[in-house]
Image (cartoon, helix red, strand yellow):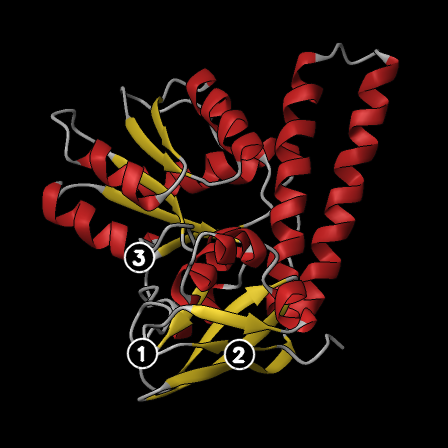
Amino acid sequence: MMPVSAAIIDADGRLTDWNGGFEAEFAVARDLLQRGAGFAQVAAAAVEREGFARDQGGAPPEAGPGTFEYISGGRTVRVESTRTAGGGRLRVAAETTDTARIAHDLNNMLMSVLANADSISAALAPDSPSARHAEAILRAVDRGRVLTGRLSGITPKPAAPADEAPAGRPGRAVSVLLVEDNALVRETLTASLGALGYRVRAADRGESARRILDGAEPIDVLFTDVVLPGGLGGTELARIARLQHPQIRILFTSGFDAAVLRSEDGLPQDAAFLMKPYDLDDLIAAFAALLAS
């Protein structure tokens, strides 16, 4: 259990004092305080670090009573703010452990391992001793996928038989905008899709993806994580993409189960969705189905 976290803010919203629990909870707070920061800046920095946040107004509270929640290490942390004419107080009011969010974090880690193990395995000769090690990693990831599925209440689909493996290359040049904040996964997916004949533009967050959408180059497919850092999430990015590129096809991905994303992030009920971690065959099949629709 984390220590009780509390802070005092002045009438202008500036942090004037806090206890050790607050400093432990917001690891960047000391540096920001020395620069005269307000709580909103501290909370925003925590959000950027954790990559997921929510509140009633869509931004960390700076004035008035309210609550602010963010995700930290698989738990939901709730911060309460109370303002008065002469200042106010903030405290971490509650925390809960959420198995769906723990599964999300584990799935993202497994995705990074799987993407890189797949890339290494493809570059090795079948009789190489290292190939056996890569296969062992892939088997371990499959086992991890089963365990995280149990946390989310999901039964992973069995692997397709080798003779049912989907064709890899698109029948024409297809332009893909890939939006993934994990650098290793993003680089590996860019290389894998490029090797299959797709023309890939990559972005690490919603805002940088939006700038690509604003450009003159047509985009055939938006392949985006749902939960992205920086404020512009995948579902809103998809809405913008459809306005600018009406014929665009959209494939969502996440370490969260789709049911969680439908209730919390507005993922459309009929959206094409590929849950992490997925291997290259899963990705090929998802793209084939998307382009055939």
Q: Label 3 amino acid?
A: Thr
- Mark 1 burial class by Cα count in 10 Å: few <14, some 14-19, many 20+: some
Please tell me which residue is depicted at 78% across the width and 50% down the height of the picture: 143
Q: Which is nearer the N-term, disc 1 or disc 3?
A: 1
| Horizontal side of residue 239 vs 136, given as left or right | left
- Helix or strand or loop: what does disc 3 sit on? helix
- Helix or strand or loop: what does disc 2 sit on? strand
Q: Which is nearer the N-term, disc 1 or disc 2?
A: 1
| Horizontal side of residue 234 vs 146, given as left or right | left
Asked whether 144 or 207 is in front, the reply is 207
- Placement of 210 over or under 233, stated as above or below: above
| Horizontal side of residue 270 vs 155, given as left or right | left
Q: Label 2 amino acid?
A: Arg
Mark 3 vs mark 2: give the one in front: 2
Pointer 3 residue: 235
Please tell me which residue is depicted at 63% across the width and 22% down the height of the picture: 119
Question: x and y percent of residue 218 in the render?
Answer: 16, 28
- Placement of 258 over or under 9, stated as above or below: above
Q: Which is nearer the N-term, disc 3 or disc 2?
A: 2
Pointer 2 residue: 78
Residue 136 appearing in the image: yes
Question: x and y percent of residue 153 in the render?
Answer: 64, 71
Q: CA distance from mark 1 to mark 3?
A: 28 Å
Asked whether 172 or 201 is in front, the reply is 201
Question: Residue 193 is drawn in which quadrant?
Answer: top left
Question: Residue 73 is drawn in which quadrant?
Answer: bottom right
Q: Which label number is shown at residue 63?
A: 1
Please tell me which residue is depicted at 35% across the width and 64% down the height of the picture: 267
